[in-house]
Image (cartoon, grey):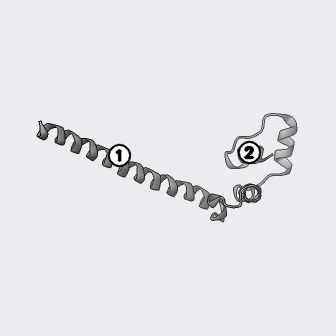
Amino acid sequence: METDIRMWYLEGKKPQLNWEKQCYDRAYLSKDEAFQILKIIELKINPNNRAYSTSKSYEDFLHYFAKEKMVNDEKYIILKKRIVENIQSEIEKIIFSA
């Protein structure tokens, strides 16, 4: 059911089977209502999930992941720069010690 809620109401993928369509039509939820249901389920399973516990709405949830991605991208860029600097330093040591 969790997968159906996510697909139908958050991802906007409407059900194909008749009985699923009837469920969808009868239980129609807004994105925030669907998110709140999923949040309750997730926090029962994993109470330490920061993405869900810090998000009040589905938009907050998306913002959280966008911010996390930006932070991770910045960390990657810094790490990549350090690796390149270390390689250049090692090359210079080899060239100047020869």
Circle 1: residue type: Lys
Q: Quadrant of the N terminus?
A: top right
Residue 18 screen position, x and y as percent = 86, 35
Q: Earlier in the sequence, mark 2 or mark 1?
A: 2
Rate crowding at label 2 as few (under 14), some (14 to 19) or many (20 or more) other CA atoms within 10 Å: many
Q: Which residue is mark 1?
A: 80
The quadrant in which residue 46 appears is bottom right
Residue 20 screen position, x and y as percent = 84, 39
Q: How many marks?
A: 2
Circle 2: residue type: Trp
Instruction: For the residues labelled 2 and 1, say whether their Cβ atoms are less than 8 Å apart.
Output: no
Residue 37 screen position, x and y as percent = 77, 57
The quadrant in which residue 31 appears is bottom right
Element under disc 1: helix
Q: Which residue is mark 2?
A: 8
Judge whether 62 appears above or below 6 on screen.
below
Residue 71 screen position, x and y as percent = 46, 56
